[in-house]
Image (cartoon, rainbow, N blue to C red):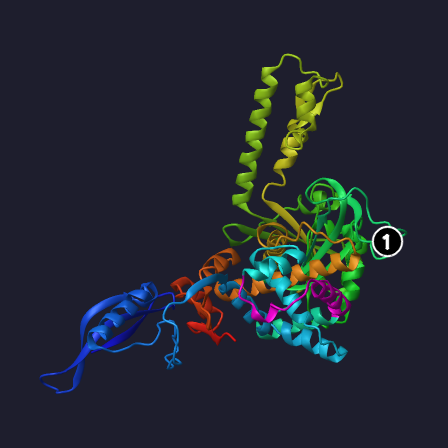
């Protein structure tokens, strides 16, 4: 009689194991031994291990056999005097730190940082300190003090246990001094591992504000020059820094930049051009939104990346309003929500190629939304007899970003609905215009390429709000602010790689990994670290990432 394990492969590719109690009997005709099932225990990942242990102990007790301590999952013989009843000291997070460390190594981050350290003759474990800060961003973001003082005590990362707080900040300075070499080495390592096509580079900027009253003054603080007053993306005026990010079509970060908070988007291109010029990215098309579209930027982009794909401001550029939107001709239908047609304006060197795209579903949604606003305005105007623009209700409407575009003030000072503005707005429903200097890119590739710009918006959401939490930043030195952003960018890199390989968003991956924990048992003589049973969804995550599940007993040490 024995415990039998069988497996079954599901449609999604996952493997499920079952445990059965069986014994062999001879087949009456073939005389060959065949297994006869006595009892089905069910799925192995849903069994309570302690139930099996109690069954083993009861059988052993009846047979008069002394069994080894059940904590030893390795099957090795236990030393004499091994304790039978250990106490629980603490339980630590294990799944997420283990997976992040495996990806950290697979992406070559440990190798690259250690190589730079060795070349400089540095023996301090800066690589471990940087890993701890990156891993924390992906699990439960804390300040650098919080990582050292609180978070490391809640996770199983034995290689980081000896870190000192001073080493965390020194590691940031080490990364700042070598960031160009690190970013370049890591990107090409990742491009090789994932076989990425670096044919499109999506670029955009965001802001990160600080809760301080004054901007940086280089006369007072020599190494504080980044925090400058500017209009934050959230809509308020505050000391801030500008963060630029370039990613591939898969959302893999190519490089990040931290610029003074008063830097305009249109002036960042020269910096990007200079930094990417030496990377030899081959044929890489630069994709950006309308904030980057200016004559000067187009010239810089043509010199930096060769080809570009830029959105246009439809309502404020006369050539687009007159020549592109007014161009007659049929759209080419690629799919239900993507129609496009090409419009060429000018000849020779002044020739410009525009792609006019149209989404019928989005057009219907925008028209319906605008109609609801107009109906609200009509109801509001019908409530009041005094339609003077100086009335409080009129002032509120005229100050509203939602309503003011559809209102006008007559010569006599009365508020009226602007029917012309409503008709003009309908021209842009579901449409967007792209300008490119690449004559070889197809209509469909151009339209889909720009729609892919939403991938960088998702990256910014992850950086700032959903998971990594770039803000708040507690640093004032420019080098520390820049390094903090670089650490968050490394966390974004690991997050995106995990998402691509698992086919799941990071928050779901993290939720599955949080189920895997390590518990410390102890007595006066022994210290045992043992993981809990691996749940099915956690097992599937590990398989997707090609990570071998750890042994049941992580470590068994005898205390001195």
Give the residue displayed 66% in from the left and 13% down from the top. Answer: 386
Q: Residue furthest right?
A: 219
The answer to whether residue 195 is visible is no
Q: Residue furthest top?
A: 385
Q: Which residues are magenta?
A: 155-180
Horizontal arrangement in the rendering, residue 478 relative to residue 364 (left or right): right
The answer to whether residue 182 is visible is yes
Q: Residue furthest left?
A: 28
Depth check: give the residue in front, 193 or 361: 193
- Label 1 packing within 10 angstroms: few (<14), some (14-19), many (20+): few
Horizontal arrangement in the rendering, residue 174 relative to residue 78 (left or right): right
Percent coordinates x, y for residue 451 in the rendering = 60, 54
**Residue 191 falls inside the magenta stretch:** no
Q: Residue furthest bottom?
A: 31
Percent coordinates x, y for residue 383 in the rendering = 58, 16
Name the residue that disc number 1 marks.
221
Quadrant occupied by the N terminus: bottom left
Depth check: give the residue in front, 461 or 290: 461
């Amino acid at each position: 009689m024995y415990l039998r394990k069988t497996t079954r492969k599901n449609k999604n590719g996952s493997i499920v194991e079952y445990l059965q109690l069986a014994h062999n009997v001879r087949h009456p005709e073939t005389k060959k031994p065949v297994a006869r099932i006595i009892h089905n225990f069910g799925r192995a990942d849903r069994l309570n291990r302690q139930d099996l242990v109690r069954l083993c102990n009861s059988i052993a007790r009846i047979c008069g056999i002394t069994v080894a301590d059940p904590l030893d999952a390795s099957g090795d013989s236990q030393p004499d005097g091994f304790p039978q009843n250990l106490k629980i000291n603490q339980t630590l997070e294990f799944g997420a730190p283990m997976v992040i460390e495996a990806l950290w190594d697979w992406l070559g981050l440990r190798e690259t940082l250690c190589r730079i350290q060795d070349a400089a003759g540095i023996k301090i474990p800066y690589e471990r300190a940087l890993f701890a800060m990156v891993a924390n961003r992906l699990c439960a973001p804390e300040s650098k003090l919080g990582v050292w003082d609180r978070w490391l005590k809640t996770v199983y990362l034995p290689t980081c246990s000896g870190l000192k707080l001073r080493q965390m900040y020194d590691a940031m300075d080490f990364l700042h001094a070598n960031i160009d070499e690190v970013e370049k080495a890591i990107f090409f390592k990742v491009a090789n591992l994932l076989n990425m096509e670096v044919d499109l580079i999506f670029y955009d900027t965001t802001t990160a504000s600080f809760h301080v009253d004054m901007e940086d003054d280089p006369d007072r603080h020599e190494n504080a020059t980044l925090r400058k007053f500017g209009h934050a993306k959230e809509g308020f005026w505050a000391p801030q820094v500008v963060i630029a990010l370039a990613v591939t079509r898969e959302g893999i970060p190519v490089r990040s930049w931290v610029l003074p908070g008063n830097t305009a988007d249109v002036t960042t291109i020269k910096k990007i051009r200079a930094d990417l010029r030496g990377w030899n990215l081959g044929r890489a098309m630069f994709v950006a939104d309308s904030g980057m579209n200016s004559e000067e930027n187009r010239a810089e982009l043509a010199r930096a990346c060769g080809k570009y794909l830029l959105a246009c401001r439809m309502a404020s550029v006369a050539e687009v309003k007159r020549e592109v939107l007014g161009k007659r001709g049929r759209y080419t239908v690629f799919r239900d929500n993507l129609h496009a047609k090409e419009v060429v304006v000018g000849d020779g060197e002044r020739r410009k190629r525009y792609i006019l795209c149209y989404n019928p579903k989005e057009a219907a949604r925008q028209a319906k939304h605008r109609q609801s606003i107009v109906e609200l305005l009509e109801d509001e105007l019908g409530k009041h007899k005094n339609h003077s623009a100086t009335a409080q209700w009129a002032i509120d409407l005229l100050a509203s970003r939602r309503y003011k575009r559809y209102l006008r003030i007559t010569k006599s000072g009365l508020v009226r609905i602007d029917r012309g503005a409503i008709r003009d707005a309908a021209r842009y429903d579901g449409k967007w215009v792209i300008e490119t200097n690449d004559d070889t890119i197809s209509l469909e590739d151009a339209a889909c390429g720009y729609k892919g710009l939403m991938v960088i918006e998702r990256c910014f959401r992850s950086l700032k709000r959903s998971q990594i939490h770039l803000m708040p930043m507690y640093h004032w030195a420019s080098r520390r602010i820049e390094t903090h952003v670089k650490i968050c960018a490394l966390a974004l890199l690991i997050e995106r790689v995990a998402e691509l390989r698992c086919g799941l968003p990071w928050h779901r991956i993290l939720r599955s990994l949080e189920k895997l924990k390590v518990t410390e048992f102890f007595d006066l003589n022994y210290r045992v670290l043992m993981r809990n049973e691996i749940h099915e969804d956690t097992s599937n995550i590990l398989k997707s990432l090609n990570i071998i599940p750890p042994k049941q007993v992580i470590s068994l040490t005898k205390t001195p």
